[in-house]
Image (cartoon, rainbow, N blue to C red):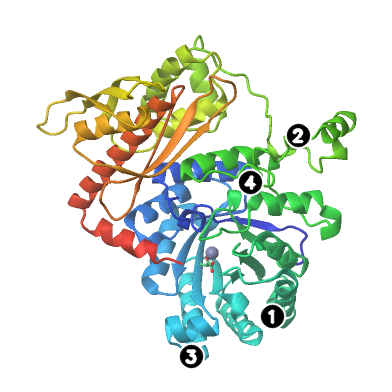
Amino acid sequence: MKGRNTDRVIIFDTTLRDGEQCPGASMNAREKLEIARQLARLRVDVIEAGFPVISAGDFAAVQEIAREVKGPIIAGLARCVPKDIDAATAAVKPAGKRGRVHVFLATSKIHREFKLGKAKDEIIRLAVEGVRRARSQVEDVEFSPEDASRTEPDFLIDVCRAVVAAGATTVNIPDTVGYAIPDEFGTLIRHLHEGVPEFSDGRAVISVHCHNDLGLAVANSLAAVRNGARQVECTVNGIGERAGNASLEEVVMTLRTRAGSFGGLHTTIDSKEIVKASRLISRLSGLLVQRNKAIVGENAFAHSSGIHQDGILKKRETYEIMDPHDVGWGATELPLTKHSGRHAVAARLKYLGYRLTEEDIAAIFARFKEIGDKKKLVYDDDMAALVEGQIAEVPQTWTLDYLGFTSGNTTIPTATVRLARSGSGKAEATVAQEASTGDGPVHATLRAIDRITGLTGELADYTLRAVSQGKDALGEVAVKVNFGGDEPVSGRGSSTDIVEASARAYLNAVNRHFFTADVRRRRPTAAAGRAEKRSSP
Ligand code: KIV
Ligand code: ZN
């Protein structure tokens, strides 16, 4: 990959690694693969697919992405420890020459003294050993001095020189705690650029990785680019640890919209895929995009004041600095209807980028027919919601067979629920029915479900949003439920009826809970993996 002397900025997407560290955002392997495929369509240069040593699940997800996703470089993260580096190397191996190992070690005084208890020379020795080990297994090695923005600049130069000499081809400068401000961060990058010959002659690339604790992640990344950085690490929708990472869409669209101010620097991103990527990631991560979020928020191109609307009608550029179509808003879509056949549904799923088995398509088609009966037009977003329900990869222990409820301002809300339980082993498939009252129809429904399953779930979070347009839009409910375990369990469900969507989301969480308990019973080490994951960078 070319270095600083080119006018191309490499987009390194870490949605599946740092983005996934966002509390409540964890995704299963199948969901990560769908996201990676969309990132490839977006034409990111590098996909950081995960942190392979953390758990068997992370390892398998990175390996599958490395095997299945063509185009971008596939990176795996590793601490400067042999077992991490070996796991990352093995996980990215199926990508062949497109495999990258990303090694990191903290370098700032505070991390050296309080976290690692190591002196400067020891840090350099470990960093060099880590890079050498990675380089002996793959050609493409990136090194990150964690908390670089709070590291003494001259020591940082020593670290960069040492790791580049040891074989790192990219050195990433993280603003790990989001402490930097643009001028200062730009100056630091320039200092490194001037102090490390391999950066100025293009043999190694300076990358940046900015967190958004002060809301400056994008501004800091762009200041770095002005001063010699040629790789930006970012996430779609800006998701990530704490306040998140630099948002991919904001970095890319600033470079494009203000190309003149960045000396013609550009990325190879296909911007028309941005909105699709944003929605997919929002739905699969369960992290809603705020309405006024730049580029991808619902309001990003909505003009409410009369003066603005008038201006837009006369000339769009009066109030719009970007064409919404350029980032994928309003992509022409021909909605499906209940008359659409299986072939049309399968073709639309393919167009949307999903690669599904015949079995998945059959299940989605059945749900599509149910939805099509209730709603005239089934939009792409509706289809995506159905697919995501299907690929949740959780065995459907309990499924909704019947739901009826009464509610009103003078009626005690009451729900009757019938659930089917799939048979497993010697246990026969059964059907069970219960009724309950509640504070509202959703409450009554969830209580009836609890009576059947024998669980008592506490709703830790509940969000409802309209998936597509119109009064008959599908409602999508996302829940987080405490069933008394260490962490709340998430679930999603959609329907034209919001009580039914709530029941489906809750059942999805119930099934996930049973599934996780089952996996834990059979694989006691899985719990240890999860505990370790919480302490990841
Ligand atoms: O924020 C950070 O420092 C990181 C590193 C692992 C690159 O995520
Ligand atoms: Zn980070």
Q: CA distance from mark 2 to mark 4?
A: 33 Å
Q: Earlier in the sequence, mark 4 or mark 3?
A: 4
Which secondary structure, mark 3? loop
Residue at 18% x, 37% y is 454
Question: Which element carries disc 4, helix, strand or loop?
Answer: loop
Residue with the mark numbered 2 = 304
Give the amino acid at mark 1.
Answer: Val
Q: Is mark 2 within 8 Å of ligand 2?
A: no
Q: Crowding at label 4, few (<14), some or many (≥20) Cα neighbours within 10 Å?
A: some
Q: Position of residue 492 (x, y in %)?
A: 41, 36
- Residue 417 falls left or right of residue 388: left
* Residue type, mark 2 in image: Ser
Camera-side residue of 394 and 75: 394
Given residues 157 and 251, the one toward you in this image is: 251
Residue hosting label 1? 196
Find disc 3 in the rendering and name its residue.
119
Marked residue nearer the N-terminal end (2 or 1): 1
Residue name at image x 57 percent, y 78 percent: 163
In three-dimensional space, the C-alpha distance between marks 3 and 1, rounded to whole angstroms, equals 22 Å
Query: Residue drawn at (69%, 63%), measured in percent from left and top?
Result: 221
* Mark 3, other Cα within 10 Å: few <14 / some 14–19 / many ≥20: few
Residue 501 drawn above or below residue 172? above
- Name the element at disc 1: loop
Marker disc for residue 283: none
Question: Looking at the picture, how far across and down is residue 440, in whole percent?
Answer: 37, 29
Mark 3 or mark 1, earlier in chain: 3
Label 2 to label 1, Cα distance in Å? 51 Å
Amino acid at dot 4: Arg
For disc 4, the marked residue is 43
x, y percent for residue 67: 45, 48
Which residue of the protein is positioned furthest toward the left in this rendering?
Answer: 426
Residue 53 can be seen in this image? no
